[in-house]
Amino acid sequence: MSDWAATERLRAKITLAEGLTILGEVHLQPRVAWRDGPETPLELLNRAERFFPVTLASGEVVFVAKVQVSTLGYQEELTPPDPAREHAARHIRLEVMMVGGGEYRGMACSELPPNRARALDFLNQDEPFFALLTEAGTLCINRRLVRAVRPLS
């Protein structure tokens, strides 16, 4: 499929709502308008389109419905944070319990205003997905499939 040549690929493990997993490469835009660098998986999932392409190991492409994605996990190279944004960020440790029984612990990064910077405010944001940095890598988590969250100290 030559129309995917202009994207950057990233290996990912996608867990669907019913527990099935898809291993493949997601296709990220090489540039975004609001900052330098390629699109992130979180930005991909929070875009308005309802489906996104994944290239399987066989070379076949499957279109995955975002509403059915429970988590999308990936490893990324650590890049230095943007100093201007790092000072505004608040790191929140969370334990996330998913519909279907999955549980994840990690750190979420919030850039909310100081008067709205609680864990609850972070969880109530409008974007369908949020990122959680875990020991195994980064997880993009579907807010609609979260059963409960416990803030950790």
Image (cartoon, helix red, strand yellow):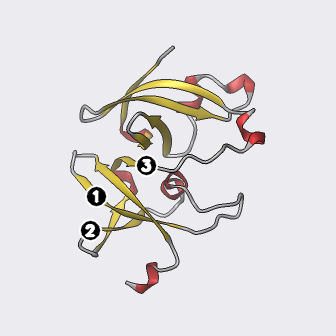
The kind of secondary structure element at disc 2 is: loop
Q: Which amino acid is tagged 2?
A: Ala
Whole-angstrom CA distance, mark 3 to mark 2, is 17 Å
Q: Provide the residue designation for mark 2.
A: 57
Whole-angstrom CA distance, mark 1 to mark 3, is 13 Å
Residue 75, labelled with which disc? 3
Residue farthest to the top, as pictured: 153
The kind of secondary structure element at disc 3 is: loop
- Where does the image place residue 142, in percent across and percent down from the top left? 42, 43
Image height of 50 relative to 68, above or below: below
120 sits left or right of 136 in the view: right
Q: Are marks 1 and 2 in contact (CB under 8 Å)?
A: yes
Image height of 25 relative to 107, above or below: below
Image height of 147 relative to 6, above or below: above
Q: Which amino acid is tagged 3?
A: Gln
Of the two numbered discs 1 and 3 on the same chain, state the one appearing first in sequence.
1
- Where does the image place residue 128, in percent across and percent down from the top left? 49, 46
Asked which quadrant contains residue 114, the reply is top right
Residue closest to the eye, 67 or 94: 94
Q: Provide the residue designation for mark 1.
A: 23
Asked which quadrant contains residue 11, the reply is bottom left
- Where does the image place residue 135, in percent across and percent down from the top left? 41, 33
